[in-house]
Image (cartoon, rainbow, N blue to C red):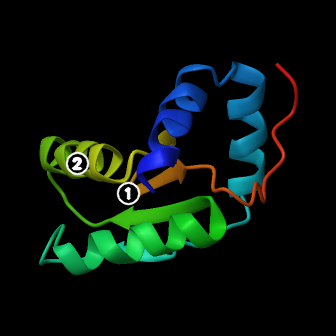
Amino acid sequence: MLCFQPLIKEISMKLSNKQKQYLKGLAHSLKPVVLLGQNGLTEGVLAEIENALSHHELIKIKVSSDDRETKQLIIDAIVRETEALNITKIGHIVVLFRPSEDKKIELPRK
């Protein structure tokens, strides 16, 4: 995973609006694969998110928190810890993208 980190940062910096819109379209039909409950962001939840990102590349997460600031802090922590790209956030749902070595999702040209 260490040799792959620079590639993730490079891709996240270069995602165009067209590519983000494409990913939003793909995510539209997805169901949340991780649901954060009362316990918040734990090591186990982070491990599940890592696993889901490695397997799917594009995932939805439901963050159940009534406080906007708390919800945003949780999302920021997830993005920081997983080195994923936050594509969009609507209500309690956040869409994350992190390319894997297998390149399951082919992004359109910029």
User: Disc 1 or disc 2, which is closer to the eye?
Assistant: 2
Q: Position of residue 32 (x, y in %)?
A: 52, 71
Residue at 17% across, 44% down: 73
Q: Position of residue 44 (x, y in %)?
A: 24, 80
**Mark 2 belongs to which amino acid?**
Ala
Instruction: Check the picture and name the quadrant holding the C terminus.
Output: top right
**Mark 1 belongs to which amino acid?**
His
Residue 36 visible? The answer is no
Q: Nearer the viewer, residue 91 or 60?
A: 60
Give left or right: position of 109 versus 24: right
Label 2, secondary structure: give it.
helix
Instruction: Check the picture and name the quadrant holding the N terminus.
Output: bottom left
Residue at 38% across, 57% down: 92
Find residue 92 and name its label. Answer: 1
**Residue 68 falls in image quadrant:** top left
Q: Residues within 10 Å of mark 2 (few under 14, many from 20)?
A: some
Q: Nearer the viewer, residue 101 or 18?
A: 101
Check the image and report above or below for 55 versus 4. Answer: below
Give left or right: position of 65 versus 56: left
Q: Position of residue 103 (x, y in %)?
A: 76, 54
Find residue 19 and name its label. Answer: none
Residue 58 visible? The answer is yes
Residue at 56% across, 49% down: 98
Find residue 77 and name its label. Answer: 2
In the displayed image of the protein, which residue is found farthest to the front?
3
| Alpha carbon distance from label 1 to label 2 | 15 Å
Marks counted in the figure total 2
Check the image and report above or below for 28 versus 37. Answer: above
Label 1, secondary structure: give it.
loop
